[in-house]
Amino acid sequence: MIKKLCERAYHQFEQDQYQNLANISVSHLYNLRRSKTYQRQRCSLTKTRPKKVAMGISRKPCSNDQRGYIRIDSVHQGDQDKRKEIYHINAVDAVTQFLVILTIERISEAFILSTIQKTLEALTFETPRLHADNGGEYINDTIAALLDKLLIKATKSRPSHSNDNALVESKNGSMVRKLYDYEHIPQHRTSQFSPFNQTQVYRYVNFH
């Protein structure tokens, strides 16, 4: 599609700036889109916004060699040309490495609440503790009420300790980015990712 648009711009509309793009291969065109230069100019990744709420204990996560100690994080797919992106919610068990990836349209409290509920259901075992960074999507009264109801203790990463949530951060790269890369994916595509994540991806990452 991109290749055809470049060819049309050069040959039909005589836009000389598209001459080189019109003559290169499709595979090389996608390689250029993955370059750091292109990503810096076209995409912007939103950093985690810390929020001060009396929820959870700031501490280094420890599983005590027991399953059910979950690390969770959000993976942003990158804004482009002021268009918002989708978000992947990545949760991993510290001991069994059981992984759940869900895709949502926005990281507001309403979306995160239902996503955490689906994540806990997909884990198929008891979850005594949930650890997150200090992002406002997890550190809020709505999530605190849900976890209290389910008797799940919440912990959060300590300030200036970026490796507290290193396990799920590594899974963001080795699993989520490996599947979906860094390219912008618009919000209206969410419905296409949700069933895929809950079926094929769920079986693929938890085949062990």
Image (cartoon, grey):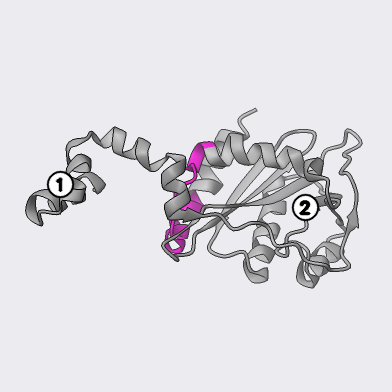
Camera-side mark, 1 or 2: 1
Q: Which stretch is magenta?
A: 178-195
Q: Pointer 2: what residue?
A: 132
Residue 201 placed where, x, y %? 53, 40
Residue closest to the far left: 12
User: Taken as a whole, is the magenta stretch helix, strand or loop?
Assistant: helix
Name the kind of residue labelled 2 in the image.
Ala
Q: Where is 65 relative to 3, above or below? A: above
Instruction: Work out whether 116 lies above or below 67.
Output: below
Magenta-drawn stretch contains 179: yes
Mark 1 and mark 2 in contact? Answer it, CB < 8 Å.
no
Location of mark 1 (residue): 7
Relative to 144, residue 23 above or below:
above
Residue drawn at the location 59% of the way across and 58% of the way down: 46
Name, please, the residue furthest toward the front: 16
* The quadrant where residue 147 appears: bottom right
Give the number of callouts.
Answer: 2
**178 to the left or right of 10:** right
Of the 4 image quadrants, the one containing the C terminus is top right
Q: Earlier in the sequence, mark 1 or mark 2?
A: 1
Which one is nearer the viewer's eye here, 23 or 176? 23
Q: Residues within 10 Å of mark 2 (few under 14, many from 20)?
A: many
